[in-house]
Structure formats: structure tokens, C-alpha cells
Amino acid sequence: MVMNYQDAMEWIHNRHKFGIKPGLQRMEWLMSRLGNPEQHLQAIHVAGTNGKGSTISFIRNMLQAHGYTVGTFTSPYVVTFNERISINGKPLADEEWAELVDKIKPLAEELETLPLGGPTEFEVITALAILYFSEHPQDIVLMETGLGGRLDSTNVISPILSVITSIGKDHTAILGETMEEIASEKAGIIKPGVPVITGVENPNALNVIKQKAIIEDAKLDTLGDQFQIIDVSTTPIGEQFNFTNEMINWDELVIHMKGKHQMKNAALAIQAVTQCLTHVSEEKVREGLLTTSWVGRFEQVFDHPPIILDGAHNEEGIQAMTQTVRDHYHDKKKHLLFAALHDKPLDKMVPLFTNTFDTVTFTSFSFPRATNPEELYSLSSHPRKDKTYDWKEFVMESMKTLSKEEVLIISGSLYFISEVRKFFENIG
């Protein structure tokens, strides 16, 4: 029986009862039953604590500028669930999702009867993506890990290139408490003989990646070594930098995505594109960089006053966000509305606001793991802190009362940003 879209989504989301189960056995079983489609993708595999989505977006836009068709598998979604699987930036249609679920559902139900147990929600979505890309071949597929790398369900693929964007402390209960442990999990995507690119800066984490690359005989290109960004500057429209590697030296590249960290993501993407294409056009690279945007990443959703959404949700992300606020809005009064999930290192994240924002307001949102505003409030020593349970009322009031000399940043969780973004779409 052919499912409709609503039934398909309900079935997918009901997989959450299986929780997070690290390991590749269920994925390998599913892939085997589907004829091993994962072995036939021209895929770039992207892992890292932060910057995965932005790096993928830069790569996609540069490849598209060169005339290539590009499939992407990303998570979590910000606007609609369908965006998790996209072709040239366009999410799959409802009917396509329903057709895919029709093919996977019988296999998932069979797997539930076996000792391996039923596949998780993320395993199912990953299998759907791989199946779709095998049935609708793209020139290149960009696959983002969901959690870690070594045991992530995307790690069944045989990529043409691996990218590890950054290493920071997130999901420590699963990935480990130290930078070395986390790096070891991310480095699990490095495959024998497959080139790898990294922007990891922490020396201990980088050493783990280097050792893994040696073991796997994988050529490693490191930002700051084999390729570099120099002469960086902040402009009113974004960032500007020079890029150089063994083959090229390009000056005054411009991106609209704001933040010093985005220049690093762009550099990783340029290096990836130069590895994958036999001929790279500087003009097309510039075009791709300039047209790249990524929802929920320092995204301006209102002009007067400026209201910015940023999905920073861990210590490294908050550091990047606050630096970007200081760089781009040093002459404005800065306000923060913040909500977060309780499994994040909040005691390290919240204190980072004090030296950047003039006021900080803590809130919550409708999500099972959302933190109570009182808890966030208690962690802050900010002299002008507040809390509210009604973030919508707070935003509406801010839109009325803030001047053009002020800016409101809304941050703390991509799930929160997704809710806020829908709110702004509804109010027009």
C-alpha cells in the first residue's frame, strides 16, 4: 500500500522510540538488502563539531556554479523536514518521501524481528537518502554525519573525499570527554586511501587525525598547512580573505555569511572543490562563495531593528557567535534572547555572554530537552539579565521598542531557531 506523506512522516518520527544506538550493523543489514547502494555514490563525507552545514553549503554552491548537480543530506532541519535530502538546494517533494518510506518500511519492520533490533530514526533517514541518491544519481553527493563519525549511520558510504571541519566538546556522553576521544570518533570517517581535509586547530585533536590518516594511507590537507587563509577582514556585507594552496592564490574572496569561522568553512570548501574537480574556475568559485547562505546561521530575519538568528548550541559555537556579534555590531547596543537544551555544557556557555551583550534574556521553547529559564538565569552573572517563558511576546515587544542602533540576537539551539523562524514567517 502506497503511504501518503503524513503517514510516512508519522512512521519516521515514531522511530525515536529506538533512541540513539551507535553502531553500523543495522545500516549494513539495510544496505545489503537494498543491493548496497552506498558503494556507488560519488560522495564527500563531512564530520565535525561545528561548521558541517555551512561547509556543505559552500561546497554545493561552488559545484553548482561549475554546472554540477549536487545531492545533500544534512541535519537537523530548520525550515521543513524535507530539506534533509535536497537536490541542488531544493528539498525532496512530499510524494518522493512517501515513495521512499514505502520501500524502506518493510525492511525496517523485518529488522525489528531480528536480534539487531529496529533501526533508529536517523538510520532510517540515512538509508532513505542513500537509496534516493542511488536511484537518482547526482554528480556529487554531500553527506553530513549526524553524531560523531566512526559509528554514525552515514559511515557505511565509500566516499571520494572526507572533511573534518572542527573538534569541540559536544555530545560528550556518547563521543567522550576529551578532545582526543572526540577527535578519534570524528576521524572514524577516514577511509583507506581516501583524501581527507581538516580545519581542526586543537593540537591534541589534530594529532589524532594525523595518526589516523597515516594508518589509513590517506592524504591529509590541513588548514594552515597545505592551504591557508590570509589578509582576513570584516566588511559591512560579510567577510573578505585571500586563499592559497599548492596550486592557486586567490585574493579578496568575499562571502556574505558573517563570522571569522565562516572564512574557515569557506576555505575547507574551496580545498574540497579543488580536490574533486579536474578544472576549477576562479570565477565560478567566487560566484559560489558569494551566493552561499545557510538558514539559522547568523541569519537576519528582520531589518528595523536588526534581528539575527544563530543556531550556536555548544561552547565552540557560542564563542564564534559572540565574536561575530562583536565584529559586526560593535557600534550597536546588543541584546540576546537565549534558549538551550539541558544536555549542553551550559555552565561553560552562559558565562560567555557577559562581555558581549548589554542585556541577556533567558527563555524556553516547546521541546522535550529544553532547559528551564530559571536554570539558565541562575548560571548567569550578567548585570542585566532577565527571564521569560513567553519568547514570542518578548520578540514582538522588541520589534516595537528597539531602535536601529540596537540589535537582537536569538540563539542557543537549532531547534529553538527553527521555531523562531516559523514565527517570523507567519507574521510576514
Image: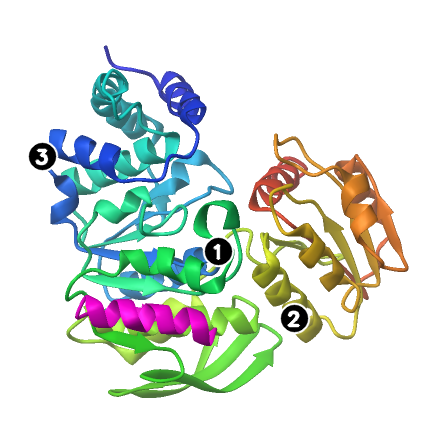
Q: Which mark is residue 13?
A: none
Q: Is residue 133 above or below residue 109?
A: below
Whether tag 1 and tag 2 are in contact, CB under 8 A, the answer is no
Q: In this view, which residue lies farthest toward the left?
A: 35
Q: From this viewpoint, is residue 199 visible?
A: no
Q: In this view, which residue lies farthest toward the top?
A: 1
Q: Which residues are magenta?
A: 197-218
C-alpha gap between disc 1 and disc 2: 19 Å
Q: Which residue is mark 3?
A: 35
Q: Is residue 224 above or below residue 425?
A: below
Residue found at x 72% / y 58%? 306
Q: Is residue 218 above or below residue 29?
A: below
Q: Which part of the image, by quadrant, shows the N terminus?
A: top left
Q: Earlier in the sequence, mark 3 or mark 1?
A: 3
Q: Which mark is residue 323?
A: 2
Q: Earlier in the sequence, mark 2 or mark 3?
A: 3
Give how far across and how far down residue 374 sits, in percent: 81, 40
Displayed quadrant of residue 24: top left
Q: Is residue 211 above or below residue 14?
A: below
Residue found at x 70% / y 72%? 326
- On whether residue 213 falls in the magenta region, the answer is yes
Residue type marked 3: Gly
Q: Earlier in the sequence, mark 1 or mark 2?
A: 1
Please state if 218 lies on the left or on the right of 396 as rendered: left
Q: Which residue is mark 1?
A: 294
Q: For label 3, count other residues whose C-alpha is less than 10 Å away and answer few (under 14), some (14-19) or many (20+).
A: few
Displayed quadrant of residue 264: bottom left
Of 385 and 169, nearer the camera is 169
